[in-house]
Amino acid sequence: MTAVPAVSAGRRPMGGQQVAVALLLPIALINVVGFMLPIFNLARYSFNRATVGGGIENVLTLQNWTGLLGDPFYLQLILNSVFVSLGVTLCALILSYPIALYLHRASGSWRTFLTVLVISPLLTSAVVRTYGWIAILAEEGPVVSAIRGMGLTPPPLMFNINGVFIGLTEILMPYMILALLAGFGRLDPRVEEAARTLGATPWQSFRRVILPLTAPGIALGCLLCFVLAVSSFITPKLMGGGRVFLLATEIYDQAIVTLNWPLASTLSILVLVIFGAALVAYSAVLKRLD
Amino acid sequence: MQIHKTSKPMGILVAVLFLYLLAPVILVFPISLSGDSVLRFPPTSWSLRWYEALFENRAMLGAFWTSLSLAAIVTVLSLVIAVPAAWVMVRMEFRGRDLLFNLFTAPLLLPTIVLGLAILIVFASFGLLATMQGLILAHLVITLPYALRILAVSLATQNMACEEAAKTLGAKPLTVFFRVTLPMLTPGIVAAAALCFLVSFDEVVITLFLTGPRISTLPVELYNYVYNTADPLVAAASVLLILLTLGVILVVERAMGLGRAFVK
């Protein structure tokens, strides 16, 4: 009995290490085969050359990159993607902020209930939610009928950038709300109360107290939404009706329809570059806030 | 003291914003009961015809069973792989542990459109396109990070006194794991399982790259359907999907509280 601990104590370091490696092997294998290898391969593909007829020449060329950045269509596409994403992010922020503030102040089971309401769209398939928006904005949908009912001519809402904008904003709102809430931790109700007791108007207290205190949450939410908007595919594809060209839809079309994998890879890497730029901007904003 | 009580205009504003947020999810319910042959709201008549049409649609039914079995297999595999991995990551000290953890959860940082294309290109050369094995592997890439993260948090917050006690009383490491650690980990396992199931069942972008006429999942079929036609059929399917999701949410809520499963 006394010998057992001594033996196991003596052998554990070696045996433990082997066991640890064995237990981590499956997840490491899947990570390598399903993540690292594909991503490195993707980066490599952006320097390959697509030949006529869907073939791929294994060379090292900057052709995709120079072609991409010299083509007005793609430059417009990139600018479109960035501006739409920025606009959607701003709208999502404006619409999410009051909800997040309200949730932050709510308490008990009411708060839990509202939180579940915020999270539940996240757990609903993007296809389902986009379909819901198609139903709402359709020619015979409630919004168009209501506008007609008021005797006005409804603007074109579906199969153009308007629909994509409306749908995408709603789809990203839960992320924004959760990010804002995470950043609202520093917002102590007593600080606000102090401002109001000292004679600040509601607007002043919002502008001078609440807004600065919640700025880190705003920055985080904007980063998250922007990144998700740039790479969103389902909503622009379904609601754009083939008339809205954004980076993500172009990646898919090049990969599946045109079968130009090198160009699709180049566009993908470009999305990652935009991600990197967003991250840099985010850290710069955070630094200035501190 | 009452300064904080939310004012009425604020309450109304928040209600309107919530309506916007939930509108697409709410609206599919009445539309699914439409008797019209086109997408129209409010419907001119009510019926269950779209549910009937859904259950007679072979492609949808086939895709549903594919999705269900795929999600089930992926969930089980995720747990079998992630529970031991999380245990090693949390309970053992070794160099490069944080780096490894970040690497294992990194697939979540990549947009699915990029990951989908990357996997498509590699799987094409492995002959894994439009196969069940390919779909399982691709889904594991994105479910494992969720599972690992949730299980690691659960393990890290677990009280280790019980494990210590069992060890002191002479239990072998495996006995400690199966009789003490694992039972205490149940809420985390349930949450991880539910999330893996939902992520796999709802995954559409990566799957879109990997499916074909031979094999398709429900979200991909729905996507293709909406892309080509807009009628209330998808509303009926959406209602069933939402109810399924709701059921899974309730399980998670029971097990550990939804907020905790998401925020960290």
Image (cartoon, coloured by chain):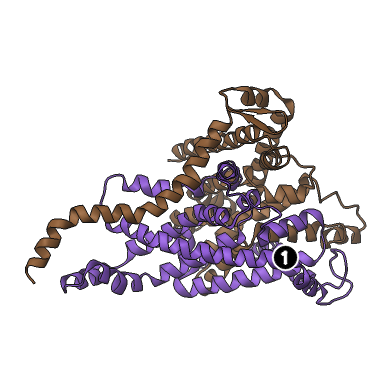
| Residue marked by disc 1 | B60
- Residue B20 percent location from the top left of the image: 70, 60
Tell me, what hue is chain B?
purple
Q: Which residue is drawn at 66% across and 29% down?
A: A50
The answer to whether residue B54 is visible is yes
Rendered image quadrant of residue A273: top right
Which residue reaches farthest right? Answer: A151
The answer to whether residue B7 is visible is no
Which residue reaches farthest front? Answer: B127
Tell me, what hue is chain A?
brown
Asked if residue A89 lies left or right of residue A30, the reply is: right
Q: What residue type is labelled 1?
A: Met
Rendered image quadrant of residue B84: bottom left
Of A118 and A66, nearer the camera is: A66
Number of callouts: 1
Rendered image quadrant of residue B12: bottom right
- Residue A74 percent location from the top left of the image: 70, 30
Which residue reaches farthest bottom? Answer: B47
